[in-house]
Amino acid sequence: MLVFSKQKLVFLATPKAGSTAIETALSGLASVVIMRPPQLKHTPAARFQRFLAPWLHAAQGDQFELCALMREPKDWLGSWYRYRQREGVPPARSTRGVSFDAFVRAYCSKDRPEYADVGSQAQFLSTKDGAVDHIFRYERMEDFVDFLEERLDCSITLPRINVSPEGVTELSRETAELLAKTCAADFALYESLGRR
């Protein structure tokens, strides 16, 4: 998470959506940088609004706008799946020996196993009043960079950092339909981004 106090802007670090590259490129311009531990780095919008927004408002007397990235939901799950195939991932969280189709079915189940319990982008980006002010598609990173360059009045070049390894992320028709139903809020929010 990055707080730009002069610009009254906060970047929320959506997990598996380019946050490490953004933070690496822009941490020197931010007033507050939270990169560790992951529970603080990836502070959801509702938690920010409840705990940090009042603190910033008390300190500066202003409301801050929130910005974030969102990944296409299947692609986002694919990134988690590939990320958890790495060496050194604890066995309960590892997706080694699990197909992507099985991973997505586990994610869509009522009681998710630990390896498939990765949250929801729609929940991460939601506040009691709606959603984050400015959400950009991860796949259109150039739009987000343009937004940041205008707001921060600087040129930005993003490094490629923390990229998940390659992997097969194909789904059967039945699993794709199950995912669409289970993650209806995520797909609806993602589809709305071109119209917001």
Image: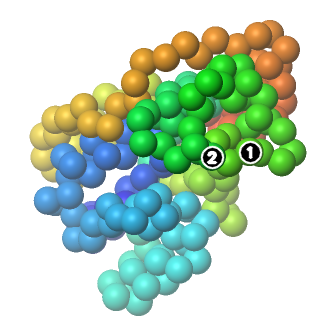
Q: CA distance from mark 1 to mark 2?
A: 8 Å
The mark tally for this picture is: 2
Which residue was labeled with disc 1? 113
Which residue was labeled with disc 2? 92
User: What's the residue at 49%, 83% (across, down)?
Assistant: 54
Q: Amino acid at mark 2?
A: Ala
User: What's the residue at 20%, 35% (across, down)?
Assistant: 159
User: What's the residue at 76%, 10% (across, down)?
Assistant: 172
Pick the residue in front: 187 or 161.
161
Q: Position of residue 101 (x, y in %)?
A: 71, 20
Disc 1 and disc 2 in contact, CB within 8 angstroms = yes
Q: Secondary structure at mark 2?
A: loop
Q: Which scheme is used to colour this image of the protein?
A: rainbow
Q: Amino acid at mark 1?
A: Pro
Q: Secondary structure at mark 1?
A: loop
Pick the residue in front: 76 or 144.
76
Q: Earlier in the sequence, mark 1 or mark 2?
A: 2
User: What's the residue at 49%, 64% (across, down)?
Assistant: 39
From this view, report whether residue 196 is shown above or below residue 132.
Answer: above
Q: Quadrant of the C terminus?
A: top right
Q: Position of residue 135 (x, y in %)?
A: 49, 44
The residue most toward the bottom is 58
User: Pointer 2: residues within 10 angstroms few (<14), some, or many (20+)?
Assistant: few
Q: Position of residue 38 (x, y in %)?
A: 43, 60
